[in-house]
Image (spheres, rainbow, N blue to C red):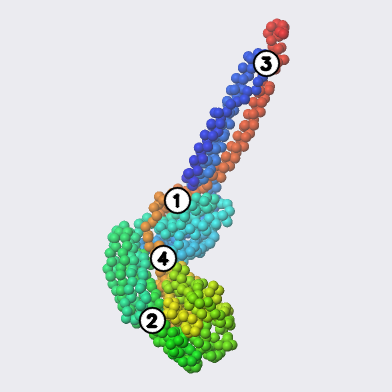
Amino acid sequence: MGLLSPFLLACGAVLAVPLWLHLRRKRRQAPVEFPSLRYLKMAAARMKRQARVEDLGLLLLRLLLVALLALAFARPVVRSRSNWFGAGRAVQSVVVIDATASMGWRGPNGTRLDAAKRLAREWIAGLEASDAVALWVLTDRLEQPVPVPITDRGQLYRALDALTPAEGSSGLAPVFTAAREWAAARGGGRKELVVITDNQPAAWDWPAAGFFQRAWQHSATSLVLLAPDTTRAANLSIAAVEWDDRALREGALLTGVAKLVNHSDAAATDLLECRLAGQVLLRKPVELAAGGSVEVAVAVPLPALDGPVLTGELALAGDALACDDRWCFALPVRRAFNALVVDRDSGSGGGTRASFFLTKALAAGGAGKVRAITAEAWNKQAGEGVDAVWFTGGAVSGAAAWAKALAFAEAGGSVVVTADAPPDPLPTAWPVTAGEPLSLPAGRIATRLLVPAHPLFDGIWSDQTAFPPLPQKTVRSCAPASGGKVLASLAGALPLLVEVPRGGGRVFWLNASADRAWGDLPLSPVFVPLVQQLSRARQLAMQTTTAAWVGEAWPDLTNFAGAASWPAAAAGNAVPRAQRSGLFDALAADGSVRWRCAVNVRRAESDLRPVDTAKLQALLPGRVLAGTQGVREWREAGGREVPVWPWLLAAAALVFLAEGWAGAAAAKRREAAAGGTVPSVGAASRFRARASGGRTGA
């Protein structure tokens, strides 16, 4: 017999209470008036002997009651093959297989997942034919191939055979939470939970102690934790890679640092390779101390960059766990952008016009070709090879010019309209409502970022690095049109920067102007970086969606890639999340590559050294076993933990009733003895008269 809550045996200390009360109790004696004490002493002695026997029985019943309650609170279980205590009833079992990345470790007889499937077969085969079994699988989340217990062994075995290795990472908390809910929903009956896992630290990185002490207490479910083996597996992994991609251009050096970790108790050596476009460009031998880590500098020349993203991987020569021996990466290529500045009149505009300052700011860094053209030239301009178009100084001359700008945005370009550019009347799909110019007080006007996480502000402005105030004299009182979002505000409430997605590109409204008549914006330190960030808006939006972990949702491509979609499952259905590590392409309807993404396994799965068995055994209200031998031990011991505490509680209830009945009966006997066994005064007088020969005393 075992105890699921042995610490509650401390309740047995309450046994001292009735014993102490029994010893301290003083019996109340009812006074009886009688002229002679001889008969009173005889009756008192007889009552004392009777009370001693009765009180001892009550004491034993009370002690037994407290002992039964203390033992029941400790929740004892017995292992039985017979029908005693309900052991012969059918069992409802849930078998859970851990299929996370760490279970892909390969030993002499295959992976740990293969061993887990064999153990699950052995366990199911050892059950009675009437026992029902459910099959759950832990990947990056809890999946349920057989959600409820069934008796069809064929279906269970087919579900087992269909299991494939996964690369997700997840703790065991969802397993026990779902099992507790399942046990509560199934009501009474015998229930059993078998979790087959390698017990790596990542699986127990959650407040398990509090869960089992509180939430699991009333589940009434037998728990078995079964490990595929007892091997303390060693493993090397690439824990992280950081690249310096600020100057990502053809012919330059791509530099970075790779962190390697040795999750074992012995020193190890390996070979680190860097591959770009399928070519090995770097090989470096590495040495790692036992349980240590090392940072390796990487520098490789960049090949021709003909796509929007540079992809590659760093890889070790490999060990028994392959999924963390490589690190896939995808780096957005920051190409030099080409821009047009459209002004109403002259392309140069002189030294005070907005087009002059915009051209200088664009050419200050990051731009390839920058040209200033007139509004009339815009109507004849081809949009190929241009990334951004700026409209300033009333350059939008009519509906046709604006329709061409919208078509340019839908094709993936960025259109920026300053506050001094709107025509009259406003054309369709203008980013803001009509607004009159407002004069602002002299000085710098306070600004505020409403979407600090937007790619336009990433790395430049944030909550910690405020967007600076602007020296503006004039702004427009307007509001964003339908579909527009205010990214920054001016003077407390006025929109400063409005974004409107348009097809694969964007339209921006800037409530300011580089024209000196509107203010001193060109003299502000924010002017050059803001102009360049707006001009490369599409590149900035794309650079935040090139990496994901296994189990995460695919990056959303609707804002910049149009109808491109990520890989589908084998059945052709859309996959909502990344399920495997590697490099993946998002394809347009015509089959062209619109974007790429690198998916990696979470490195919490790399440490394969299991949690100490003694710690787990102390933590869990069940058994911790390993391998086929563990299954045999469970079967030889009876294999079925049957709760005994309901029987103990029933026995305690019977003892309670017996104690009440015995106490009441003893009280009645004492009352009868006190009132009927002591001779009365009249009887005593007649006895004295017979003894004295008929004489009666006064």
Instruction: Give the percent coordinates (x, y) of residue 651.
Output: 57, 40
Labels 1 & 3 near each other (Cβ < 8 A): no
Task: Give the position of the C terminus as an image quadrant.
Answer: top right
Helix, strand or loop at disc 1? helix
Residue at the spot of label 4: 602
Q: Amino acid at mark 3?
A: Phe
* Within-10-Å neighbours for mark 4: few <14, some 14–19, many 20+: many
Helix, strand or loop at disc 3? loop
Of the numbered discs 4 and 1, the one sitting upstream in the chain is: 4
Q: Residue sitting at 50 percent across and 87 percent down?
A: 393
Can residue 26 be seen here? The reply is: yes
Of the numbered discs 1 and 3, the one sitting upstream in the chain is: 3
Mark nearest the camera among 3 and 2 is: 2
Inter-mark Cα distance, 3 to 2: 124 Å
Residue 619 circle label: 1
In depth, the one of 513 and 335 nearer the eye is 513
Residue 365 circle label: 2
Work out which residue is located at the far front of the displayed protein and give it: 442
Helix, strand or loop at disc 2? loop
Residue 521 circle label: none
Q: Residue sitting at 39 percent across and 75 percent down?
A: 331
